[in-house]
Amino acid sequence: MVGSPVFLIAIPLLAAFLIPLLGMVWKELVRIVPGLVLAYLTFLSATLYIDVINSDTIVETIAGWRAPWGIDLVFSPLTGFLSTIMTFMGFIVWLYSYRFKRNVEFEAAKKYFIFLMLLVAASVGIVITGDIFNQFVFIEITGISAYALTAFYTGRNSAEAAFKYLVMGSLSASALLIAIIIVYAQLGTLNMAEIAANIDNMNVEYRIIAMIFFIIGIGVEAEIFPLNGWAPDAYTEAPGPVGGAFAGIVVKAGIYAMVRMMFTLFNISGPMQILIIIGMITLIIAETSALRQDKLKRMLAYSSIGQMGLVLVAFGMGTQAGVFAALFLMLNHAIIKPMLFLSGSYLEFNTKNKYIKEITGMGKKMPVVSAIFVLGALAISGLPPFSGFWSKLSVLTAAADENMILIITLVLIISLVEIVYYFRVINRLFFFDYDLEISVEPHKPGWNGMVALFVLAGIILFIGFYPSSVTGFLDLAARDLMDTHDYINNVLQLGQSIIQ
Amino acid sequence: MDTTELIRIGVYGTSILLILIGLYAVLTKRSLIKIIIGLSIIDGGIHLLLIGIGYIKDGTAPIFSPGSENAVARMVDPVPQALVLTAIVIGFGVTAVALSLVIRLYRHHNTLKIDEIKNLKW
Amino acid sequence: MKKAIVILMLAVFGYFLAITFLDPQFEAERNRDGVKKFYLDKTVSELKTANTVTAIVVNFRGFDTLGEVTVLFLAATALGSILFKKRHHIGDRTVLLPASAIVGSGAKLIFPAITLLGVYVFVHGHLTPGGGFQGGTIIATGFLLMLIAYRDFSISHNILSVIESLAGIGFVTFGLLGFMNGGTFLQNFLGTGVLNDLLSGGVIPIIYILVGFKVAAELTGLIYTVLHEKG
């Protein structure tokens, strides 16, 4: 017994309060402690996940009041899977930024690591909590750390990006609160399982309105159209590793909140047109915008939004195969996109305006980093034999099972578009000569960043060659999401509602 | 229509009106400070809505004092009150961060007009 | 033109809100009991806390409050990070004009009373309306008054930061102690005493007092950071 799910939240919070004190003792501690905490979280999450797979879902009550009276944390095959990926990616991002922040002043570095740690902890909180208001609180914690991280560099235009993000985030939080008010007024409870058990008692009209408000409320974190206007700016202006953390951690939490709401809270079974439509619009607009970008990180950001659209389309099919494909996409995206962001920010480290043309010929100056970038680009556009291929294939088979021709065509076209814009970058990297007039001096990567990149690249290659190593986990997670009845049983422990 | 109904419609109506006024300010005003004021008005409206949910006729505060132990039936719902406390604190935190961002924008651009800050046009 | 679109949007939005909340059906179909009755019962019978709202904030939904305290901590940290400058200009404030003698002596006179009221509010958080957040805010207004009245009134940032950290650590530690003694995080593990006594409610008053210290330190820190900002 290494701990219980509540430690995933309590320990990082304890550490966040401790760091200002530790910083007074020895300055290096503010860099080391967050890493130790994130490593512990990864270990704890992985151990609990293995436990959960082998036995049963863990439902942890807080303050001694079981659901629906107290707040509960649900650690199931699905939430365990996501929280393990998130904590692991959090650790990788920490590893990458360990030395990167050495050239920043102490006070700033201290705050950077506090924000990063709380960003990861709160995202995990969004995933494992079983209470809608508690989820709202965690969404806000994620939000505030994200605003602060976006505005981290004082020299750039980061304050504008952060302000834009803040206004959208705050408006959508208001919508989420209205949805919570409607649900609480009608059902008299805030517990997800209790709501799911009683949702049929709620008037259909109110149910639809509450659902719309929920979608608006979660949409900003999940980057759906038209609530993703903040994303390209925030990804560009934030420090390099933070872009990776947004793509690998925060968005995953947002998507989870969205599908948990649709599948469990409102207990919809069968295809969900609304998710498919939102997903398709997001996908098409984001991918066509990505094609037009001339800045590397903006392109990556739009590509990330597009991928999330595809994930929502896959979830929207509402079948076991569709959910499986969506989770596979999320896993791949959570690993590949941060890798692209991290290697990309090494490539454009010294460029002035972050234009793609400024990294011309870097392939010869920084061969290893460029190779890793190329690996990520090939994997995310779905070329065999890399991991992205298998997830796109599973989306296609899931769509084919349901005879959704439109989705199949769309996925194929989008893959082509992705290949086009990623090859534009690869072309510049390798097939143009290094030219001092347009490009810049390469930046020498630190050992910690290289270790982080190699670990990610290794995972991508491993999943690419042995996709069967993860499909078992994904299958369990997909089954967990589909089975609302089981979720209610696990949380309420009686199989029926307690509140009349 | 009895007085309970009137009070209820009054509270809900006011809060909806506040939300709409705040939203109008956020969407049309061109000054950063006014946008933040708009966000705060929306927050205020939602908090009123949340408290309104707990209202019952002739209710009392959910606090037990000696001699009033059997007033449970008349006590209003304590949950929205606890939630609104959390919501207010969170709203405060977000407003503080927003204002600090505005201070920094003002430091850079020497203006609060949204049109003169290039990235904020959308 | 743009205004017309916005007003149209708002009309649609307002319509949806109105058909939800102003509909008499919304009241008629409500589940009024829900979790409310359980909370009202258990607050008296098990937690021995007179103020049900405090019992919910600190115990039943204490996890939310931990998150809430974190939001404040983050806001204070974010403010410092966003307004951070390479060259330190902390020193004289330019935002304020010197206050008159009346304001100065008045502030001196009221400041102890405000602090006392704040302490009273958070110490009695489990008995009367109010609590850590309210009490902490009251204390911070006292410091705001002093900062307005005296241009050279200064508070050590380090002391505030230590108070803030210790209070936060205390909160999580009490949660973890509950985990060790009772099996769940934030569980009450102390004797609950007699309803309406000052020493009742187990860990609830202790945690709320910690919250009070934390909120007071954080809000004072926020005011201080912003006041020392040169425009």
Image (cartoon, coloured by chain):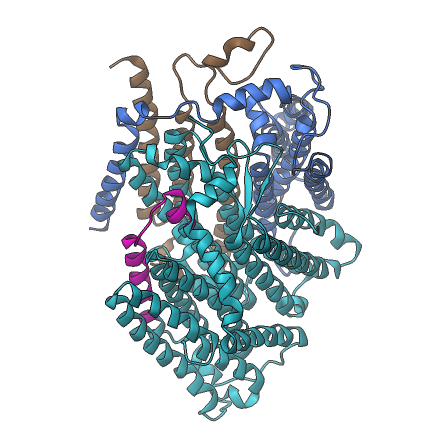
The x and y percentages for residue B82 are: 52, 29
In this view, the residue farthest toward the top is: B67
Residue A281 part of the magenta segment: yes
Q: In this view, does C48 lie above or below C222?
A: above
Q: Is residue B117 visible?
A: no
> Along the line of sight, which residue is nearer the eye, A214 or A167?
A214
Which of the two residues, A336 or C119, is positioned nearer the viewer here? A336
Image quadrant assignment for residue C190: top right
Q: Residue at x 41, y 37 (%)?
A: A197
Residue at 49% x, 21% y is: C37
| Residue at 38% from the left image edge and 39% from the top image edge | A179
- The image position of residue A268, as x and y in percent, is 33, 47
Q: What x and y, as percent, mark residue A169?
A: 43, 50
For the colour brown, the matching chain is B
Q: Does the magenta stretch include residue C34?
A: no
The colour one sees for chain A in the rendered image is cyan
Tell me: residue A229, above or below residue A300: above
Where residue A19 appears, as percent x and y from the top left, is: 71, 52
The reply to whether residue A54 is in sight is yes
Q: Which of A492 and B88 is in front in this view?
A: A492
| Left or right of C19, for residue A455 | right
Chain displayed in blue: C
In this rendering, position of residue A87 left or right of residue C10: right
Residue C105 versus residue A108 in the image, above or below: above
Q: Is the magenta stretch mostly helix, strand or loop?
A: helix
Q: Give the range drawn in magenta.
A: A260-289
Residue at image location 63% in from the left, 61% down from the top: C86
